[in-house]
Amino acid sequence: MAKKKVNKKANKSIEKKLQKFGKAVGSKIDKLTVQSVKAKKQAQIKYAKHISMLDKKLKATEAKLKKLEGQSDHAWHDVKQGAGAAWIELKKSFDKAFDEYK
């Protein structure tokens, strides 16, 4: 069985992109939180549910990214697929929630 060649530079690039995206999502969650304070009570409940859901997904996705940090190159390759999928799901959820409050 042939081993896949792992590109450390590409792995680091992906990791940095995921970290940057995580920070952007965190920043937008903070903006939603500020907007929720200004909203009426019924809207505040809706904001709170979305913020809670997004925050949980962000934390889960960040945990997957943390798993990548200590992995060998070959293990990193296997784990990054799951982390990438988690970031995609987080982005979809975030975009949907954030679009409701524009």
Image (spheres, rainbow, N blue to C red):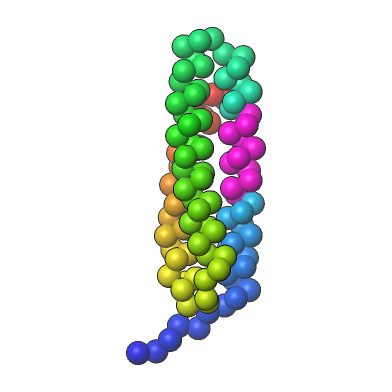
Q: Quadrant of the N terminus?
A: bottom left
Q: Quadrant of the C terminus?
A: top right
The image shows residue 96, relative to residue 45, as above or below, that is below
The image shows residue 5, relative to residue 92, as above or below, that is below
Horizontal side, residue 62 vs residue 9: left or right: left
Image coords of residue 59 (percent x, y): 51, 45
Image coords of residue 63 (percent x, y): 50, 53
Image coords of residue 73 (percent x, y): 52, 77
Residue at position x 43%, y 86% from top? Answer: 3
Most frequent secondary structure within the magenta stretch = helix
Residue at position x 52%, y 64% from top? Answer: 68
Can residue 22 be found in the magenta stretch? yes
Can residue 77 be found in the magenta stretch? no
Q: Quadrant of residue 37?
A: top right
How many marks on residues? 0
Q: Is residue 96 visible?
A: no
Image coords of residue 79 (percent x, y): 45, 66
Which residue is at the far front?
Answer: 70
The image shows residue 43, relative to residue 57, as above or below, that is above
The magenta segment: 21-31
Q: Nearer the viewer, residue 13 or 44?
A: 44
Which residue is at the far left?
Answer: 1
Residue at position x 61%, y 57% from top? Answer: 17
Residue at position x 58%, y 33% from top? Answer: 29
The image shows residue 48, relative to residue 17, as above or below, that is above
Q: Is residue 56 visible?
A: yes
Which residue is at the far bottom?
Answer: 1
